[in-house]
Amino acid sequence: MQHFITEKEHPIPRLLIPFLLVCLFAVCTIIVTVLGLKTYLKIQKDTDLAYQSRTGASYLANRLRGTEGAISLKDNHTILLTENENGSTYETDIYFSDNTLWESTVLSGSEPIDSEKIVEASDFSVHWIASDLLSFSITGTDGKQDTRTVYLGKEALSR
């Protein structure tokens, strides 16, 4: 005769292991989500800061290339674009003031008013390399610098 010893199984150990695995999965999911969010926010912040200097530099380069009139420099922080349209002469000042690059277009001889903000920056400088090459540098608020050299074409030789 065989004696079978049967112990009554307790439901707690049987349910505890799956419950602990589910809890471990939930904790790991939360940790991965928080780390991913932190990484995403850092990348987004870096992208936004780099966007400032790139956007300002691209806008300014295209603005200079699209100008059909004279381009001159008032100082190392100010560009003057002079264009004739419908018999009137307009001057566009692109200047750096109060950690911002500004643009203002007025009739020739008038003082700049209602300037439009191009981009926030910590520094801006511009200088001629040659009669048809203008170089400028914009430093974003993050300290990243974007330097561009713009070829203004043969017609720039008469400017």
Image (cartoon, grey):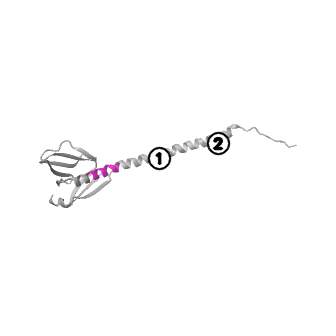
Q: Is residue 1 left or right of residue 85?
A: right
Residue 97 is covered by the magenta coloring: no
The x, y position of residue 72, in whole percent, is 17, 55
* Image quadrant assignment for residue 146: bottom left
In terms of sequence position, does the residue under pointer 2 or pointer 1 come before the other?
Answer: 2
| Residue type pointed to by label 2 | Ile
Say few, some or many: other residues with alpha carbon within 10 Å of mark 2 (under 14 / 14 to 19 / 20 or more).
few
Residue placed at 21% from the left, 43% from the top?
Answer: 115
- Tag of residue 25: none
Q: CA distance from mark 2 to mark 1?
A: 28 Å
The C terminus is located in which quarter? bottom left
Residue closest to the eye, 105 or 100: 105
Residue 20 percent location from the top left of the image: 61, 41
Q: Which secondary structure, mark 2?
A: helix
Locate the N terminus and report the quarter of the image it occupies: top right
Q: In this image, 54 relative to 82: left or right?
A: right
In the image, the segment drawn in magenta is 49-59
Check contact, mark 2 vs mark 1: CB within 8 A. no
Residue under label 2, please give it.
17
**Number of numbered discs overlaid on the protein picture:** 2
Q: In terms of secondary structure, what is the magenta stretch mainly?
A: helix
Measured along the vertical axis of the image, is residue 74 above or below residue 14?
below
Neighbours of disc 1 within 10 Å: few (<14), some (14-19), many (20+): few
Residue at screen point 45% across, 45% down: 37
The kind of residue on which mark 1 rests is Gly
Whole-percent x, y for residue 68 in the image: 18, 54
Percent from the top left, x then y, of residue 33? 49, 44
- Secondary element under disc 1, as helix, strand or loop, is helix
Determine the residue positioned at 57% across, 44% down.
25
Residue that mark 1 sits on: 36
